[in-house]
Amino acid sequence: MQAHGCFIGSAAVMVLSDQDDLVAAARNLMTFFMDESCGQCTPCRVGTQQMLAALSSDQWDETLLTRLSQVMVDASICGLGQAAPNPVLGLLKDFRGELAARGVQLIASTGAPAAMRGDA
């Protein structure tokens, strides 16, 4: 599966139908990862919280989600934090049409949360 850009992780496979809401599934998975984070490393603990907050809107900041995902993958101590962004990255890569059909608007920004930019 790796040859096709897939990450099997713990070998758990989720099957969704064309009737399932991929946005709700992504939010549910991020909630799971946030709840399961042990809290030891900041990229996972804070990253899952920030990503869930970013997914809670109908306007997804693609730049922020991509950058946050990269930090989580690169700097999380364990596989949970490294794998947590995968559902979101998969949606951004392969399911853009479905996101739009569910009312999600993808925007590009500076990639930094307002508090980090000094806008807040």
Image (cartoon, rainbow, N blue to C red):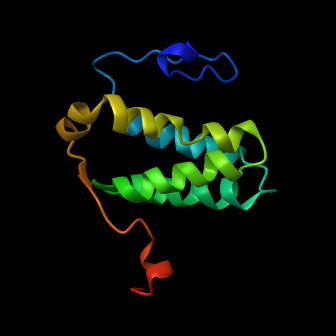
The answer to which of 24 and 75 lies nearer the viewer is 75
Residue 77 in the image: x percent, y percent?
A: 78, 47
Identify the residue at image location x=32%, y=65%.
109
Answer with left or right where residue 20 lies relative to residue 29: left
Answer with left or right where residue 14 lies relative to residue 32: left
Residue 33 sits in which quadrant?
Answer: top right
Identify the residue at image location x=66%, y=41%.
82
The answer to which of 100 and 66 lies nearer the viewer is 66
Residue 65 in the image: x percent, y percent?
A: 44, 53
The answer to which of 18 and 98 lies nearer the viewer is 98
Identify the residue at image location x=77%, y=57%.
41
Judge whether 61 appears above or below 1 on screen: below
Q: How many marks?
A: 0
Residue 1 in the image: x percent, y percent?
A: 55, 12
Residue 39 sits in which quadrant?
Answer: bottom right
Considering every residue shown, the one lying at the far front of the view is 3
Residue 22 in the image: x percent, y percent?
A: 36, 32
Dividing the image into 4 quarters, which one contains the C terminus?
A: bottom left
Answer with left or right where residue 20 lies relative to residue 112: left
Judge whether 13 appears above or below 119 on screen: above
The answer, for residue 50, to whether it is visible in the render is yes
The answer, for residue 34, to whether it is visible in the render is no
